[in-house]
Image (tube, coloured by chain):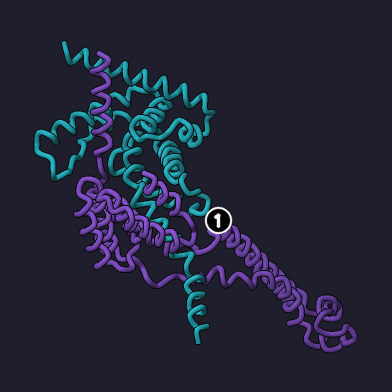
Amino acid sequence: MSDQVDQLRRELVDAHRSEGRDPTRKARGLAELMDAADRAPVAAPSRKPMRLIVGGLVLLGAVGLIALSTSRTKKAPPPPSDVAPPPVVVAEPPKPPTEPATPKIEAPPAPVEVVAEPVKPSEPAPPTVRRPVPIVRDDPDTLAKELALVDRARSQRTDAPAAALQTLAEYDAQFPKGALTQEASLVRIEALLALGRRAEAETLARTLIAKDRGGLLKKRVEALLAR
Amino acid sequence: MKGTSSAVAVVPEASAPPQTRKQRLAALYTEHSDGVWRLLRRLGNDAARADDVCQQVFLVAMDRLDDILPGKERAFLAGAAIRISRKQFGLGQREAWAAEALDVSDPRLGPDEVTELRRKRALLERLLSKLSEDLRVAFVLHELEGYTQREIGELLQIPDGTAASRLRRARESFDALLAQHLEERAQ
């Protein structure tokens, strides 16, 4: 009985592993992901939202203060002599405080300038709002074709490695700067190894590792060569 | 004059990270999306829902790409898949599994093989649905997707001993269900 159980369990595992995702949906998913990657902040993605929030709060605060001060200036325009001192205090850096006469004459605009000081922190906000968005987008159809070729090569790499290399040559010809070139190279290494062309596989592996600035592929390539 | 070549070399350096990042994401997707999707299917999601959750998993991976250590990609994605699936739908949507027609779209298979494959997948769905959630997750990860005990402990954030006992119980329970199925079929 236990043999039968083992046998059936193996068959069920195989049935599970042979289940594949609909290629069209998979390609569409990749295209959407690449699109999202284009739109996402390029560097330090986890900090950007926080910066936006802080920038937004500062901006809101500044706007609030401006609104408050303008309403105050509208309500109390008569006592310019009392209002005058604050600008003198804040105006310390630009001008010496020995000229109270000029601010008194231009009393109404002066408070606005005082409030404008705290607005300065929000100056870095525009860069966060005007984030440069890359113009070039991956065409979903192109990605789908890329993915189909790489998937085909992947499925051929062990049983029909020569055919896999042909498929990859087709991929290279069609997409010399494709989004999946790294993945295609990895499949090529596997196909070359399956054909016993180890020297070529190792040369390609070295090139791939050298090109990989992040060093993320090294482990995978080494694992392939170690087989 | 030769200095220009080094100057040229600097320019791609500056623009390299985004491209590398995108390429890594694409590589992650092409290599692991099928596995993540299958895992989601066996956790009780129908095909369409598995597609949705799978996409969310990779969006999470995109946001946290810098945190994913080389060699830990698969575990990261599986952990995210389990969490998102559990959070959004729970893992107990079992009735839908067996009822759903299981797609077998491999053109190399003949009609008899397709029928047989469908039957086996339906049986697998039915048996998995009888396991408790913890055991089902452990069984799917280890027996079907080939995760090691250590990987399962890490991604489920449970001690190694707990992972080991959970795997053992999952295997025993599944085998008991298989034996019961064989007995019923023999009668």
Q: Disc 1: which chain? A: A
| Residue A89 in the figure: left or right of residue B152 | right
The residue indicated by pointer 1 is A46
**Chain letter, colour purple:** A
Q: Position of residue A177 (x, y in %)?
A: 33, 68
Q: Amino acid at mark 1?
A: Ser
Please determine whether, in this image, residue A187 is positioned above or below residue A113. above
- Rendered image quadrant of residue B121: top left
Residue at screen point 16% across, 10% down: B187
Report the side of B48 relative to B107 (left or right).
right
* Direction left: furthest residue: B111
Quadrant of the rendered image containing residue B90: top left
Q: Residues within 10 Å of mark 1 (few under 14, many from 20)?
A: few
Query: Can the viewer see residue A29?
Result: no
Dot 1: element: loop
At which x and y percent is residue B151? 46, 35
Depth check, front residue: A28 or A80: A28
For the point 34% across and 59% down, the residue is A180
Question: B97 or B169, which lies in front?
Answer: B169
Q: Which chain is cyan?
A: B
